[in-house]
Image (tube, rainbow, N blue to C red):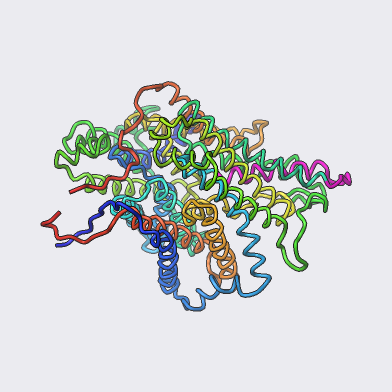
């Protein structure tokens, strides 16, 4: 394997959690809900995932538990923002703070426990293709799942009737309601899907990326996933591009550190965050007057009878 | 089959505005009992350690004031932001930036026997540093339309890393055995203590003064009216000739300035040096304080004292009951959930109705 291939492989692993979480949030925002608590759902997925995996000895069970944990957190958020029509920004922040705290409590007994990460699954024949094979077809299952999610969500949003209804709820909830669609039900399902994705992304971090638990291990990835959704203009394939851009920046920064680039390591470590800011600014400049996201995004909906 | 229905209220009963945060605190305490039971601890003992012990003697009360000072200072500024729909969630970074800006002067003048001017200059620089740092997301929002929630949060990580670099590199104490910290600030660069045998310092009266000033501004000045109007009725505010962009700059500058002031007060008063982990998450907890205080300066003061108690209670519980510190954050997150949920009672009448009616 060449060095270039090796770097490409690490970029893919660094990008995958961002992509999975961003795709989930993209669906949520398309339905008109802004869930800022991705970080909290993601880290709960990471903590519960590794706790379940260590307790039961099964990685598959860990992944399942992580997804359920993400969905439980999302349900809590839905109860507040959909059931009680609270401010979504504030409820999302609460979810992030709550998740960071609760994950610390859940993960505390598992600090320092090492376990075997989930390994790669080589797809027969395809993985034998020179260069492309090892990079694209000899990955861990999450990488495949991430791309299946992008394709599936893209198809769902733009090729199915249910996807059309979901987008309608996000663009104009009053009209969707008038047409007889159950806005709150659609949004509830979208929020749950977002929670499942964030939980899955968390499981990737604690079961594959660094297969042990440390408090606060998501390190802002949930927030970066939110930025990727904006960057992607709420389009699934562009979210994949965005996630790979950020994953690439993270890896480049790590390689620069180990190669002894004469810059403070802290400056290099700050790069992903600075790049996020830069990208947010650039994308708004490019888009000037263009798409501004789903029109009902972040507004509570209370059906009047 | 019955279900919950929300009906918009015409008017909010005034008693509810007061009852809703109290109800939220009550629900948090009930949840706390459940959490303690789930962890297999005696809930009464734990409640005592968390919420009563911190306020049971003079030393404890001083500690509560010391912790409440940064929380309230930051929250009062954030309340102005949130009132006007500017979602600054990067106060943690503005706090650290203020500590660094003010701390720089303490490090630079260390051992020079500088005069009494150092401390006021440090406070001014801290406020300025925080304000300038907060103006970055404000500028990106007004000039480019970049989402201030994300930019202000990303800058928290940048500030944390900058502090880390400074105290490990250029500002490290040469006699500090390689510890990542600056020199201990000289007496002229330290906030005076108010009492012997405690940590209560001049920062607390400064905080109280700020609360009074901001409360007056909100209640009595045109600027205060503008802040509320832009948040509640942006269209009406535009017709009234208020400039929403300028207001974004103003509230970000005030919030950043107050967070920066809190930062330099913490560095020069309580910690007396710069080090990583200078803040136990004050900037984030202050968001909860702002909401629990109903985005009202005096409310923030009361809420700040309550959250300061949970901070100290959490430290006590860690030492005395080996409880993880993260339990405190669980309570703080729950508290914010309940505050938001209870606020729904203000805006809506919650009714159970039969499915058929709905």
Near-viewer residue (A294 or A266): A294
Residue A264 spot, x, y in % from top left: 66, 36
Residue B179 spot, x, y in % from top left: 73, 51
Residue furthest out toward the right: B113
Residue shown at 46% from the left, 43% from the top: B228
Q: Is residue B96 within the magenta segment?
A: yes
Relative to B188, A141 lies left or right: left
Q: Is residue A298 within the magenta segment?
A: no
Relative to B93, A285 lies left or right: left
Relative to B100, B145 lies left or right: left
Number of residue marks: 0
Residue shown at 37% from the left, 39% from the top: A22
Near-viewer residue (B162 or B232): B232
Q: Which residues are magenta?
A: B91-116
Give the image quarter of residue A32. Answer: top left
Near-viewer residue (A22 or A141): A22
Residue shown at 33% from the left, 30% from the top: A237
Residue A1 visible in the snapshot: no
Residue B78 spot, x, y in % from top left: 53, 46
Residue A90 visible in the snapshot: yes
């Amino acid at each position: 394997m060449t060095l270039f291939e090796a770097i490409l492989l690490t970029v893919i692993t660094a990008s995958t959690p961002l992509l999975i979480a961003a795709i989930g949030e993209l669906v949520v925002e398309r339905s008109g809900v802004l869930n800022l608590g991705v970080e909290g759902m993601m880290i709960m997925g990471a903590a519960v995932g590794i706790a379940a995996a260590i307790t039961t000895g099964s990685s598959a069970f860990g992944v399942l538990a992580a997804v359920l944990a993400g969905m439980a957190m999302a349900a809590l958020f839905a109860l507040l923002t959909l059931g009680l029509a609270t401010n979504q920004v504030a409820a999302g922040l609460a979810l992030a703070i709550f998740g960071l705290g609760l994950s610390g409590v859940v993960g505390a007994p598992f600090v320092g426990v090492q376990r075997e990460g989930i390994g790669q699954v080589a797809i027969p024949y395809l993985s034998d293709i020179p260069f492309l094979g090892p990079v694209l077809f000899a990955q861990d299952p999450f990488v495949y799942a991430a791309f299946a999610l992008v394709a599936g969500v893209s198809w769902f949003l733009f090729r199915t009737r249910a996807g059309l209804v979901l987008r309608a709820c996000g663009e104009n909830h009053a009209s969707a309601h008038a047409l007889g669609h159950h806005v709150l039900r659609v949004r509830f399902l979208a929020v749950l899907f977002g929670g499942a994705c964030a939980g899955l992304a968390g499981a990737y971090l604690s079961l594959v990326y660094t297969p042990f638990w440390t408090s606060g291990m998501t390190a802002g990835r949930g927030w970066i996933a939110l930025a990727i959704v904006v960057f992607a203009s709420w389009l699934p394939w562009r979210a994949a591009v965005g996630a790979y851009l950020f994953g690439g920046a993270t890896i480049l920064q790590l390689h620069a550190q180990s190669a002894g680039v004469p810059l403070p390591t802290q400056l290099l470590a700050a790069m992903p965050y600075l790049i996020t800011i830069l990208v947010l600014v650039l994308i708004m400049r490019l888009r000037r007057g263009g798409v501004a996201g789903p029109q009902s995004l972040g507004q509570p909906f209370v059906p009047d009878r | 089959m019955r279900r919950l229905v929300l009906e918009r209220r015409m008017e909010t009963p005034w008693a509810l505005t007061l009852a809703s945060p109290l109800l939220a605190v009550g629900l948090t305490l009930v949840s706390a009992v459940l959490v303690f039971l789930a962890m297999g601890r005696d809930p009464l003992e734990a409640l005592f350690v968390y919420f009563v012990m911190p306020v049971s003697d003079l030393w404890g009360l001083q500690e509560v004031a010391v912790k409440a000072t940064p929380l309230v200072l930051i929250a009062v500024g954030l309340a102005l932001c949130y009132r006007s729909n500017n979602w600054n969630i990067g106060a943690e970074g503005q706090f650290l930036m203020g500590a660094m800006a003010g701390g720089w002067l303490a490090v630079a003048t260390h051992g020079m026997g500088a005069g009494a001017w150092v401390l006021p200059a440090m406070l001014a620089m801290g406020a300025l540093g925080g304000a300038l740092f907060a103006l970055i997301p404000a500028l990106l929002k007004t000039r480019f339309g970049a989402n201030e929630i994300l930019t202000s949060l990303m800058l928290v990580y940048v500030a944390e890393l900058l502090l880390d670099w400074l105290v490990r590199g250029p500002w490290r104490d040469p006699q500090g055995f390689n510890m990542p910290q600056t020199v201990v600030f000289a007496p002229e660069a330290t906030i005076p203590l108010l009492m012997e045998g405690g940590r209560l310092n001049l920062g607390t009266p400064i905080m109280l003064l700020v609360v009074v000033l901001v409360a007056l501004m909100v209640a009595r000045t045109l600027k205060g009216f503008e802040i509320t109007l832009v948040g509640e009725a942006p269209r009406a505010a535009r017709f009234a000739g208020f400039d929403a962009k300028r207001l974004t700059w103003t509230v970000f500058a005030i919030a950043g300035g107050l967070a920066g002031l809190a930062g330099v007060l913490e560095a020069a008063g309580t910690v007396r040096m710069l080090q990583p982990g200078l803040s136990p998450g004050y900037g984030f907890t202050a968001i909860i304080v702002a909401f629990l205080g109903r985005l009202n300066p005096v409310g923030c003061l009361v809420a700040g004292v309550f959250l300061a108690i949970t901070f100290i209670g959490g430290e006590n519980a860690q030492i005395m009951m080996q409880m993880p510190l993260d339990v405190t954050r669980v309570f703080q997150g729950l508290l914010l959930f309940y505050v938001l949920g209870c606020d729904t009672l203000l805006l809506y009448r919650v009714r159970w109705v039969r499915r058929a009616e709905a």
